[in-house]
Image: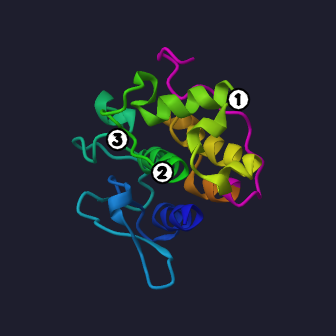
Amino acid sequence: MASGIARALTYLHQECSTQIIHCDIKPQNILLDDTFTARISDFGLAKLLMNEQTRTQTGIRGTRGYVAPEWFRNMPITAKVDVYSYGVMLLEIICCRKCLDMENENEEEIILADWAYDCYKRRKLGKLVETDEEAKNDMKKLERLVMVSIWCMQEDPSLRPSMWTVTQMLEGIIQVSAPPCPSPFSSIS
């Protein structure tokens, strides 16, 4: 499913005649067809870019927890906002939990992205999938998926890969290098 969503975003970003930035990638906007193929839905917040245009200015759009940092900094918006949201959603798929868990008694686990990076850095990825035996049996794949999600969630949009590169990393075609801390100013670096 994760690869299918990545391929769909690659299509929107690079293969359409007009580049489309979805601006609201989250689990609720991913539908499965009768063959369980992922389909992106709800283009209500999407931005269409003109030919040769790679960025745009617009007011903040999206859903709390999935919104890329550049929305809050009055920076130009590019397809990398969807890459960020995809990284958050990929972590949710991996860990089977929401990106924000305000009811979590363990303060370190409230923000999934921060907790996942901490687990990655401390080499304790098994904590992310404690109840998923299948995931625990393939720690190499788990590590690759978590590393891809961390690359996607880099605070600096220029460090995020394109969705084409994400697809290649997910499918094992491109080696995934160790990602830096996604939020260099956070307490987890």
- N-terminal-most mark, 2 or 3: 3
Say left or right for 186 vs 119.
left
Above or below, 125 relative to 43: above
Where is mark 2, residue-wise? 96
Amino acid residing under circle 3: Val
**Mark 3 surroundings: few (<14), some (14-19) or many (≥20) residues within 10 A:** many
Instruction: Tell me what residue is drawn at x 43 percent, y 81 percent.
Output: 33
Nearest-to-viewer mark from 2 and 3: 2
As measured in the structure, the alpha-carbon distance from the residue carrying label 1 to the one carrying label 2 is 19 Å
For mark 2, give the secondary structure.
loop
Image position, residue 136 (x, y; %): 69, 48
Say left or right for 126 vs 7.
right
Say left or right for 178 vs 97.
right
Where is mark 3, residue-wise? 67
Amino acid residing under circle 1: Arg
For mark 3, give the secondary structure.
loop
Residue 49 seen in render: no
Residue 4 seen in render: yes
Q: Does the magenta stretch include residue 188?
A: yes
Where is mark 1, residue-wise? 123
Amino acid residing under circle 2: Cys
Instruction: Tell me what residue is drawn at x 69 percent, y 58 percent.
Output: 168
Q: Give the range drawn in magenta.
A: 169-189
Q: Assign the magenta stretch its main secondary structure.
A: loop
Examine the image and state in which quarter residue 6 appears. bottom right
The answer to whether the residues at label 2 and label 3 have Cβ atoms under 8 Å apart is: no
- Give the camera-side residue of 81 and 127: 127
**Mark 1 surroundings: few (<14), some (14-19) or many (≥20) residues within 10 A:** few
- N-terminal-most mark, 3 or 1: 3
For mark 1, give the secondary structure.
loop
- Give the camera-side residue of 189 and 62: 189
